[in-house]
Image (spheres, rainbow, N blue to C red):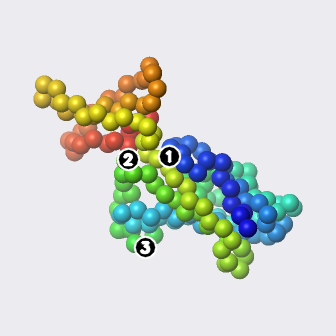
């Protein structure tokens, strides 16, 4: 039986999603585990929430009993992720445009039995963004244009001494 629901399973990173669980035993505690696997290692978060009298959980409005975050927050699992043991100590989780992040959300009951799971895809850049490399008079750059006719705001990212282009900033 399907218990987990998300309003948008494929969004840009900063977009909020609405996660709910239904068809649960009323007044029982349930564990939500979120995992992100990346080339540099894994990150994870969790929360334990209690189903209401109808057997529903709304992550946006319900405060966790325990977990990696402590207030009602629909994005709490995303924002409270911490590195796992396979992630290098002191490492930095790089966003890797145009490759999106794939999150796995699992729902388990009090005994630890997994009831449901869903994948959530979060893009660093809009999938329809066009990318054009520019080279002019000794200057190099990249033009990112969103879909549509515009007009669009212009953002210039001028790197410091490290150089390089931070393409994830193009998502704005």
Residue 34 locus on image (x, y percent): 56, 63
Residue annotated with mark 3: 85
Residue annotated with mark 1: 13
Could you say whether the residue bearing mark 3 is in a helix, strand or loop? loop
Could you say whether the residue bearing mark 1 is in a helix, strand or loop? loop
Residue annotated with mark 2: 98
Residue at 45 percent across and 30 percent down: it is 147
Query: Along the line of sight, which residue is nearer the eye, 11 or 30?
Result: 11
Query: Can residue 49 be spotted in the picture?
Result: no
Q: Determine the image quadrant of residue 107.
A: bottom right
Residue at 71 percent across and 64 percent down: it is 2
Q: Nearer the viewer, mark 2 or mark 3?
A: 2
Q: Residues within 10 Å of mark 2 (few under 14, many from 20)?
A: some
Residue 163 locus on image (x, y percent): 21, 42
Query: Along the line of sight, which residue is nearer the eye, 9 or 155?
Result: 9
Seen in the picture, residue 128 relative to 34 is either above or below; the reply is above
Q: Relative to residue 6, is residue 131 drawn left or right?
A: left
Query: Can residue 2 be spotted in the picture?
Result: yes
Q: Residues within 10 Å of mark 1 (few under 14, many from 20)?
A: some
Spatial separation of the CA atoms under disc 2 and disc 3: 26 Å
Q: Quadrant of the N terminus?
A: bottom right
Disc 2 + disc 3, Cβ < 8 Å: no
In the rendered picture of this protein, how many numbered marks are placed on residues? 3
């Amino acid at each position: 039986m399907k218990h987990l629901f998300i309003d948008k399973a494929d969004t840009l990173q900063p977009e909020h999603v609405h996660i709910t669980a239904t068809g649960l035993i009323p007044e029982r505690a349930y564990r939500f585990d979120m995992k992100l696997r990346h080339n540099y290692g894994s990150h994870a978060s969790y929360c334990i929430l209690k189903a209401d009298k109808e057997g529903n959980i709304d992550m946006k409005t319900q405060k966790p009993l325990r977990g990696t975050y402590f207030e009602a927050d629909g994005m709490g699992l995303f924002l409270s992720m911490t590195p796992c043991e396979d992630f290098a100590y002191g490492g930095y989780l790089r966003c890797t445009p145009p490759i999106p992040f794939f999150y796995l959300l699992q729902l388990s009951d009090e005994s630890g039995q997994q009831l449901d799971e869903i994948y959530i895809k979060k893009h660093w850049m809009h999938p329809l963004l066009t990318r054009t490399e520019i080279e002019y008079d000794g200057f190099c750059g990249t033009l990112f244009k969103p879909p549509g006719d515009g007009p669009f705001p212009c953002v210039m990212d001028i790197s410091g001494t490290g150089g390089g282009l931070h393409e994830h900033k193009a998502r704005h």
